Image: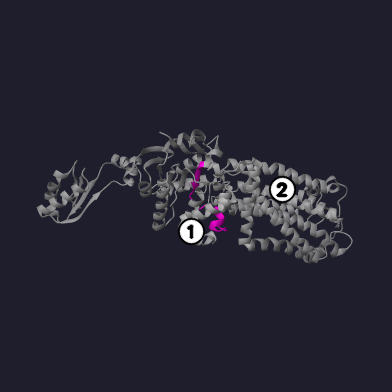
Amino acid sequence: MTSEHAPRPAIGWLLTDTFAVARRHLLKITRVPESLFFALIQPVMFVLLFAFVFGGAINVGEGGARAYREFLIPGIFAQTVMFAVAGITVGITEDASRGIMDRFRSLPMKPGAVLGGHTLASLLQNTLVLVMLSITGLAVGWRAHGSIGETLLAYVLLATFAYAITWVGAWIGLHMPNPEVAGTAGLAWIFPLTFASSVFTPIGTMPGWLQPIAQWNPVSCLALASRTLFHNPLPLNGNSFPEQHAVALSFGWAFLLLAIFAPAAVRYFKTHSTGGAA
Amino acid sequence: MTYAIQAQGLVKHFGEVKALNGVDLEVEQGTVVGLLGPNGSGKTTTVRILSTLLQADSGSGTIGGFDVATQPDQVREVIGLTGQYSAVDQYLTGRENLELFGRLFHLSKKDAVSRADELLARFDLTDAADRGIKGYSGGMRRRLDLAASLIGRPSVLFLDEPTTGLDPRSRQGMWEVIQGLVAEGTTVLLTTQYLEEADQLASRIVVLDHGSVIAQGTSDQLKSQVGGDRIELVVNASSDFDRAVAAVTPIASGAVTSTQVERRIVVPVSTGSTALVQAVRAMDESGIGIEDIALRRPTLDDVFLSLTGHAAEEETATSTKSRRSRAGRK
């Protein structure tokens, strides 16, 4: 058997294996187009709901409803990136309960590629959703007012953050006993993180004790950083450090999460057989 | 003698539960060993340790000379594993599944494609190759799963309850496939709760109960532990009963037991079907009518019962619970 293996450095195999696993997940998306459809439709619904239903009640300063829409879209970008994470949490428990994780484990492939491929596929799906969302945003009056460089940097930041946070979802998925629990637990931490942030409402409207938490919240940082780079309204709440350094802090959060959860998840995957608890 | 699979003193705890209590196991190259036992006896845990999925608390295992704990990569190059679940992606087609696992086995793209074709043909799945697994029957999924574990032409194959949940025809089909693999020289460690399956496939049987090996040997050796063949006969009329006992006694190799109420006589014999013919002739010559007569060989059920004091099936209900809670734990 070994004779069929071309001699290659480990990093080469890691990439090959990662792409093979990512391809599997992308094929799956094409087989269940409904899942992509709802992944696309959900943020669009949020845009429409908040822009036209809640928008009138939330004041972001001058400009009224139109200003709120400009404020809202970068927030929805951040929210979408967060909500997409639940998908990988459930996906990983499904693979575990069907014994597919054990099949991967029994193969001479690079163990990092199992999660690496899954997160890569998830990034590609996220990118597609962000494009769709941008189009919806343009339709309701949102514009990127910054330079091309700033606009590009905003998307790079969103994608980087999306990729990093997916690893948190993967790590959680590995610890869940079955897809049902993962479906609930996968969202349980995302909701408070997303809503106790500046995604939908300016932080100044929150109670005093919550404000510093909301300011340091990675999701707030991401929303604020996007607003800064797109030059959208960003009603600040004074002069706090996280608000003044949102872009750098968002990248910082992304790299920190990645540095913690990617190795932790891969290590957990290597050492803990999930066993097919279905 | 070279052993393809060797395990020494495997111990594994899951929390409070002692799943393995010092299991020793040896499988000679090119043979099939059946790991037999009720649910919760430690069969699956043994397989998971030997296939590098799980680390033992103590003890050691080698596959083809490679240590499962310290050389997992080398072990994975030579093994194939088919678990209790069809570990294939149900959204992909049969072909896509095999090509994926081929690629992950580090075959070149070309080799992965041709290997997939070859396996689909061999497992009679060519017609269904480009359909999604969702539309496959249980038997087809199991065949695909087995095909997936053969991608790397493993010299050692682990089959963990390969036919659980299959209908009798699909089970027969799986048996034929497994027998074919063995004929090609593959070493197989098979776990099963079906005594008939172990009897059919395995050249040697290791009986596990509560995480320990309680017996091992060939099927015949195990059966002879509980006694040899016996003739069981039921006479038509109770008036003939005593004469019938007298007529068969010369054929018996041991003490004849009889129950008058049921008109049943059990005769231990050592010459198998020859003794059966003699018994029928003896009845005929004495003019005694027979309601039923048969040569019974001990089944592995009898073996299990005599070794453990309980039947193989009986325990299933109670130990399913402990197994489930165990599977949930990581």
Its colouring scheme is one colour
Q: Are marks 1 and 2 on the same chain?
A: no
Disc 1, SS:
loop
User: What residue is shown at x 50% (from left), y 33% (from top)?
Assistant: B58
Task: Inspect this view and state whether residue B88 appears.
Answer: no
Q: Chain of mark 2?
A: A
Residue A46 place in picture, x, y as percent: 74, 62
Q: Point out the frontmost of discs 1 and 2.
A: 1
- Stretch in magenta: B78-98
Residue A172 place in picture, x, y as percent: 64, 47
Q: Chain of mark 1?
A: B
Residue B312 place in picture, x, y as percent: 37, 46
Left/right placement of residue B44 relative to residue B248 reads right
Left/right placement of residue A4 relative to residue B245 reads right
Disc 1/disc 2 C-alpha distance (Å): 41 Å
Q: Which residue is mark 1?
A: B125
Residue A83 place in picture, x, y as percent: 70, 55
Q: Tell me, for residue A164, which label it has, or none.
A: 2
Q: Amino acid at mark 2?
A: Ala
The total of numbered circles placed on residues is 2
Q: Tell me, for residue A268, which label it has, or none.
A: none
User: What residue is shown at x 65% (from left), y 44% (from top)?
Assistant: A12
Image position of A34 with respect to B235: above or below: below
Task: Inspect this view and state whether residue B68 appears.
Answer: yes
| Discs 1, 2 touching: Cβ within 8 Å | no
Disc 2, SS:
helix
Instruction: Assess disc 1: are there few (<14), some (14-19) or many (≥20) residues with their C-alpha within 10 Å of its C-alpha.
Output: many
Q: Amino acid at mark 1?
A: Leu
Of residue A254 and residue A8, the one placed in the foreground of this image is: A8
Image position of B209 with respect to B96: above or below: above
Asked which quadrant contains residue B35, the reply is top left
Asked which quadrant contains residue A263, the reply is top right
